[in-house]
């Protein structure tokens, strides 16, 4: 038994309510279970009950054993003085308020159907990656769609919150924030942190001063990234080295990272950070005012935002002084789609929230719905159990559901899980 299950049982009244009595033998009538509280304090707020003939309005606290009230030190916390009912699985101790009055207690141990408990245990103790994968096909497709929508909303909300935090750190500067956030996502998970450090070490205003020269932007980025360690026989690399030496003296900057901080191991050449930096430089040089482009552009403009090719040298190289057989190293289609999903959509939603502009949020959702479904192991797994994604909106939901609900066995917070348990 755990408290999450008891929360579920109380919230949806999945227990026998006939002839309800408190542990003290008084008649109990539940008018309103209260609102589930996910913050600090009692578990349910604004509940309404009758104990005998007296109506009580206040909080409900839930524990496995009534003695947990003492273990959790609620007796010294004023936030719990408004508790009007203590709901427990097992009543093993009488609990008093600070003023000496008894807190009415409801014991559930003999009032919950054993079949409900068994279904819950079978689900959360399942050895399968997705606990309900053998039974999810039994659930109405509308509920599955609701699960995906709720999860997708949580995912984009979480990402947009990161952007909002970054805007606050940048004192409301959306241009700087957009530049840093896109840079972070150019790391494509493996090199996220060094890319973010790189952008934070090189202000966007400084980069924009050199927007008429791709070589200078590349020199600033490669230099700050710690990738220009020495001159070579290559005219291009020598030019980068010379430019960075001049610009670093002019702006009193120095490399923020060293080469060893960038990860190359087990990456395909197309994902090498050297090439990603060159591609990012191309985006910065060709797109003036990233933030305004994102906010003011149409969905089709957003879809073509990353259609930029790197400089000539990087069209035939993945790494310094290592020519590649295959040329034209622009961002691949899947990489562009990932950037739209992980970089552009959160910016639109974050701005929409802070500016109270619902149109931007709607654009973000529309963009996700227009992008094709992502392809990865998680999405393939969902497809095998019968849940097929039609767009990036669906795949974002399924990734969120898998990582933060299924793996953590949060079945009681899932519309599919609760449906299967109570069916």
Image (tube, helix red, strand yellow):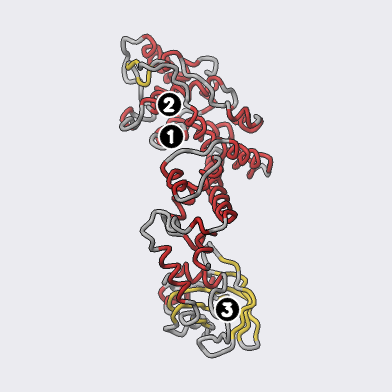
| Residue sitting nearer the eye, 88 or 259 | 88
Q: Position of residue 335 (x, y in %)?
A: 47, 30
**Residue 120 at what x, y percent from top left?**
45, 67
- The numbered mark, 2 or 3, whose residue comes first in the sequence reads 3
Q: Residue at x 36, y 12 (%)?
A: 238
Asked if labels 1 and 2 touch by Cβ distance under 8 angstroms, the answer is: yes
Compare marks 3 and 1 and give the one earlier in the sequence.
Answer: 3
Q: Are marks 3 and 1 in contact (CB under 8 Å)?
A: no
Query: Local crowd at mark 1 within 10 Å, few (<14), some, or many (≥20)?
Result: some
* Whether residue 209 is situated above or below residue 395 in the rendered picture: above
State how far apart marks 2 and 1 are (Cα). Answer: 9 Å
Asked which quadrant contains residue 82, the reply is: bottom right
Taking depth in this image into account, of 56 and 175 the one nearest to the observer is 56
Which of marks 1 and 2 precedes in the sequence?
Answer: 1
When the figure is inspected, residue 354 is found, relative to residue 127, above or below; the finding is above
Query: Which mark, residue 84?
Result: 3
According to the picture, the residue beneath numbered tag 2 turns out to be 276
Residue drawn at x 39%, y 17% as measured from the top left: 326
Residue 237 against residue 72 in the figure, above or below: above
- Disc 2 is placed on an element classified as helix
Residue 322 seen in the current view: yes
Instruction: Residue at 62%, 88% (x, y): give it.
Output: 52
Mark pair 3, 1: CA separation:
51 Å
Residue 27 coordinates in the image, percent (x, y): 59, 88
Q: Residue at x 54, y 15 (%)?
A: 212
Residue denoted by label 1: 188
- Using the numbered discs, state the Cα–Cα distance from disc 2 to disc 3 in whole angstroms: 59 Å
């Amino acid at each position: 038994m755990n408290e999450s299950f008891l929360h579920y049982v109380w919230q949806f009244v999945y227990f026998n309510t006939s002839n309800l009595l408190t542990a003290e033998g008084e008649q109990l009538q539940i008018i309103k279970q209260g609102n589930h509280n996910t913050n600090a304090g009692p578990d349910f707020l604004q509940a309404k009950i009758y104990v005998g003939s007296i109506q009580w309005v206040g909080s409900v606290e839930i524990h496995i054993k009534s003695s947990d009230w003492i273990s959790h030190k609620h007796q010294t916390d004023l936030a719990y003085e408004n508790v009007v009912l203590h709901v427990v699985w097992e009543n093993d101790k009488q609990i008093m308020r600070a003023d000496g009055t008894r807190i009415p207690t409801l014991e559930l141990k003999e009032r919950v159907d054993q079949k409900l408990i068994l279904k819950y245990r079978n689900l959360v103790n399942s050895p399968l990656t997705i606990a309900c994968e053998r039974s999810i096909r039994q659930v109405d497709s509308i509920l599955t769609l609701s699960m995906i929508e709720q999860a997708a909303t949580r995912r984009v909300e979480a990402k947009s919150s990161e952007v909002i935090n970054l805007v606050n750190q940048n004192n409301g500067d959306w241009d700087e924030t957009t530049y840093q956030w896109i840079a972070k996502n150019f790391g494509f998970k493996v090199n996220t942190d060094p890319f973010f450090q790189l952008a934070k070490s090189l202000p966007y205003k400084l980069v924009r001063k050199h927007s008429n020269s791709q070589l200078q932007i590349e020199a600033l980025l490669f230099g700050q990234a710690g990738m220009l360690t020495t001159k070579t026989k290559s005219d291009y690399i020598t030019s980068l080295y010379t430019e960075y030496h001049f610009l670093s003296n002019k702006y009193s900057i120095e490399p923020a990272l060293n080469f060893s901080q960038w990860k190359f191991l087990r990456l395909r050449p197309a994902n090498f950070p050297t090439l990603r930096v060159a591609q990012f430089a191309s985006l910065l040089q060709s797109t003036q005012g990233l933030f305004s482009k994102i906010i003011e552009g149409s969905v089709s403009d957003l879809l073509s935002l990353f259609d930029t090719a790197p400089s000539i040298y990087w069209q035939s190289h993945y790494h310094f002084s290592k020519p590649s057989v295959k040329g034209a190293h622009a961002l691949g289609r899947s990489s562009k789609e990932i950037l739209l999903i992980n970089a552009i959509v959160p910016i639109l939603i974050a701005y929409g929230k802070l500016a109270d502009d619902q149109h931007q949020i709607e654009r973000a959702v529309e963009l996700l719905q227009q992008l094709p479904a992502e392809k990865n192991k998680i999405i393939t797994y969902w497809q095998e159990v019968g849940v097929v994604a039609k767009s990036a909106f669906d795949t974002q939901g399924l990734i969120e559901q898998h990582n933060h609900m299924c793996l953590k066995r949060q079945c009681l917070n899932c519309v599919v899980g609760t449906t299967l348990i109570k069916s």
